[in-house]
Image (cartoon, rainbow, N blue to C red):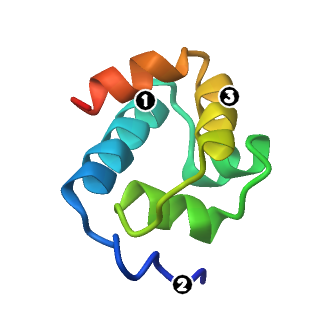
């Protein structure tokens, strides 16, 4: 399992972003495993992102948004950021 981003793990911004990713994933009927695989990420990392324990790079967020079929701006807006 990947190590959390220690200084930011659990930060409200990351928790909100992870929750938005989870909502979008579930709305599309995707498992964590399939979203991770299609985004070229590890499933354990995907789990950590959804729980707000990782600070994903912009590139990784773009990959996730692309697989989810929505603009990154929509994902950010859904997180309330």
Hey, which quadrant is residue 20 in on the image?
top left
At numbered mark 3, what does the secondary structure look like: helix, strand or loop? helix
Kindly identify which residue carries mark 1: 24
Q: Earlier in the sequence, mark 1 or mark 2?
A: 2
Kindly identify which residue carries mark 3: 67
Q: Is residue 7 above or below residue 30?
A: below
Query: Which one is nearer the viewer's eye here, 23 or 11?
Result: 11
The reply to whether discs 1 and 2 touch (Cβ–Cβ < 8 Å) is no
Quarter placement of the C terminus = top left
Kindly identify which residue carries mark 2: 3
Q: Is residue 44 above or below residue 28?
A: below
Q: CA distance from mark 3 to mark 1?
A: 10 Å
Please state if 1 lies on the left or on the right of 13 as rendered. Answer: right
Residue depicted at 31% across the width and 21% down the height = 77
The reply to whether discs 3 and 1 touch (Cβ–Cβ < 8 Å) is no
At numbered mark 1, what does the secondary structure look like: helix, strand or loop? helix
Please state if 20 lies on the left or on the right of 40 as rendered. Answer: left
Residue depicted at 28% across the width and 33% down the height = 79
Hey, which quadrant is residue 75 in on the image?
top left
Instruction: Estimate the x, y position of residue 70 in percent, counting from the top left.
Output: 55, 15
Query: Which one is nearer the viewer's eye here, 38 or 31?
Result: 38
Instruction: Single out the residue that lies furthest toward the front.
Output: 7
Quarter placement of the N terminus = bottom right
């Amino acid at each position: 399992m990947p190590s959390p981003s220690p200084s930011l793990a659990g930060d409200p911004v990351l928790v909100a972003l992870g929750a938005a990713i989870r909502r979008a994933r579930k709305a599309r009927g995707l498992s964590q495993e399939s979203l991770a695989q299609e985004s070229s990420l590890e499933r354990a990392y995907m789990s950590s992102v959804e729980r707000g324990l990782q600070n994903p790079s912009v590139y990784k967020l773009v990959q996730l948004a692309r697989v989810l079929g929505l603009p990154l701006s929509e994902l950010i807006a859904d997180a309330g950021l």
